[in-house]
Structure formats: structure tokens, C-alpha cells
Image (tube, rainbow, N blue to C red):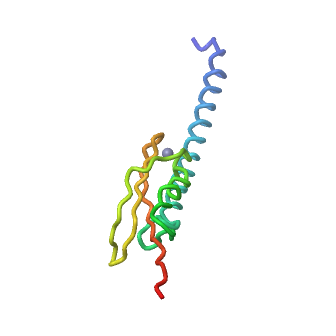
């Protein structure tokens, strides 16, 4: 036993490859989390900072124009509702990524038409 030194380097190489892969996965996970937190802070991420649009008809296209913050895949619109937050009429689009399952809410405000 111990005479067969051939599996040493092989196993070491395997472990190194696995460690590198795990490191890459951790980096990707970190980047994904960063994108998610950026998306929450960006316009539309909270009712206090809605995306201004001219018409409710633009909501779907606008919401779907952003990729999934986690895996960068394209998403589906789950629902689109009118919500009142602090007396303000807002629109809430719920999006779901079919690839990684991440759900996201995007808030909109219909820009007021000036009354003369
Ligand atoms: Zn995704």
C-alpha cells in the first residue's frame, strides 16, 4: 500500500478542478445576489420609486424589457394590478422567471395628464 502513487496527482487535480468550480459558483451566486439587490433599489423596485409611464398599456412591455436579475433569463408577467399606496394610485406588475423561479415586483406610476 502506498506504492501506487498514480492516483495522487489525479485525485489532486480533480479536487483542484472541483474547488475552482465551486469558487466560480460562489462568484456567480454573489453576482446574482448583487443584481437582485440592485434591482430592488432601482426605479420600480419599491412603491416609493415607481417607474413613470404614460399609459397602463406600456406596463407589460416595460416590465418584460428587464431580464431576470438573478439568471438574466426572460420573464413572464404573472399579474398586473392597480394598487393604492399612501393615497397614490400605482400599478404593480408581478414577474416570474420560469428558469430560476425568482419573483420580482415592479412598481409603476401613470404620469398625470396635466389639466388645464
Ligand atoms: Zn431567473
Which residue appears at 39% of the width and 70% of the height? 90
The front one of 21 and 81 is: 81
Front in this rendered view, residue 78 or 53: 53
Residue 105 picture location, percent across and down: 42, 58
Q: Is residue 10 above or below residue 71?
A: above
Residue 23 image offset from top left, x and y in percent: 59, 41
In the image, what residue occupies the spot 66% across and 22% down? Answer: 9
Residue that appears at 45% across and 61% down = 106
Residue at the image position 52 percent from the left and 55 percent from the top: 61
Q: Nearer the viewer, residue 86 or 102?
A: 86
Viewed as shown, does residue 79 lie left or right of 112? left
Q: Residue furthest bottom?
A: 116
**70 versus 10 height, above or below:** below
Residue 58 lies, with reference to residue 26, above or below; the image says below
- What x and y, as percent, mark residue 48? 43, 73
In this image, 20 relative to 94: left or right? right
Number of labelled discs?
A: 0
Amino acid at each position: 500500500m502506498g506504492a501506487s502513487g498514480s492516483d495522487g496527482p489525479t485525485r489532486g487535480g480533480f479536487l483542484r478542478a472541483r474547488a475552482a468550480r465551486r469558487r466560480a459558483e460562489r462568484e456567480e451566486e454573489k453576482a446574482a445576489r448583487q443584481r437582485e439587490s440592485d434591482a430592488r433599489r432601482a426605479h420600480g423596485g419599491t412603491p416609493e420609486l415607481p417607474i413613470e409611464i404614460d399609459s397602463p398599456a406600456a406596463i407589460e412591455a416595460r416590465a418584460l424589457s428587464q431580464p431576470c436579475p438573478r439568471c438574466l433569463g426572460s420573464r413572464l408577467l404573472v399579474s398586473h394590478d392597480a394598487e393604492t399606496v399612501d393615497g397614490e394610485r400605482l400599478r404593480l406588475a408581478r414577474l416570474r422567471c420560469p428558469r430560476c423561479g425568482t419573483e420580482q415586483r415592479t412598481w409603476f406610476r401613470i404620469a398625470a395628464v396635466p389639466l388645464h
